[in-house]
Image: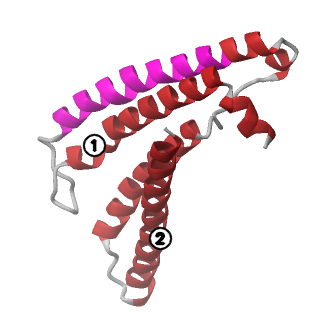
Amino acid sequence: MRTLRNYMNYILNALAGASFIAMVILTCWQVFTRYILKHPSSWSEELVSYLFAWMALLGASVVVGERGHMNISIAVERMGAGAQNAFAVFAECIACLFAGVILLYGGVQITSLAMGQMTSSLGVPVGIFYVVLPLAGVLNIVYTLLNIADILRGRAAEEREG
């Protein structure tokens, strides 16, 4: 399972990084066309906004994989190891439920609805850009299941300490 997690982390970091680099290049292109050529590029502005959403959702999946999501740990840290593990599994189950219902199910619904709409500047279906929602849902579900397995095996505490 460690190999699967490492492979997923590598791919997602590469995709999020490539998205960020593309956003920087496209934003520079926007500035150049707007202020130097005096003819702004509308397609690049639209693409940057979609790339930002992809980068954010893929980056959020990496955070789920690292168990770096926001939490208030002051109460849990005062409990015993068994209770801490139970709360950690509960938190992962909530994250998995969110990923399944909101990102996966809701993402499939909105993606299929948006396939009939075309983007204004790029001329491609909006649903293509919304595919990241169910994709992030699947990735988050896989990561939460890997996290639960690590917690139950006692590996999560080792990673936090090391």
Q: Count the marks: how many?
A: 2
Q: Is residue 60 left or right of residue 45?
A: right
Amino acid found under the numbered disc labelled 2: Ile
Q: CA distance from mark 2 to mark 1?
A: 21 Å
Residue 21: which numbered mark, if any? 2
Chain part drawn in magenta: 87-114
Amino acid found under the numbered disc labelled 1: Val
Q: Is residue 124 above or below residue 156?
A: below
Q: Is residue 71 above or below residue 86?
A: below
Q: Residues within 10 Å of mark 2 (few under 14, many from 20)?
A: few
In this rendered view, identify the residue nearer to me: 90 or 124: 90
Q: Residues within 10 Å of mark 1 (few under 14, many from 20)?
A: some
In this rendered view, identify the residue nearer to me: 78 or 5: 5
**Mark 1, residue position:** 131
| Residue at 72% across, 39% down | 159
Q: Position of residue 48 (x, y in %)?
A: 39, 62
Q: Position of residue 19 (x, y in %)?
A: 43, 62
Quadrant of the rendered image containing residue 84: top right
Magenta stretch secondary structure, dominant = helix
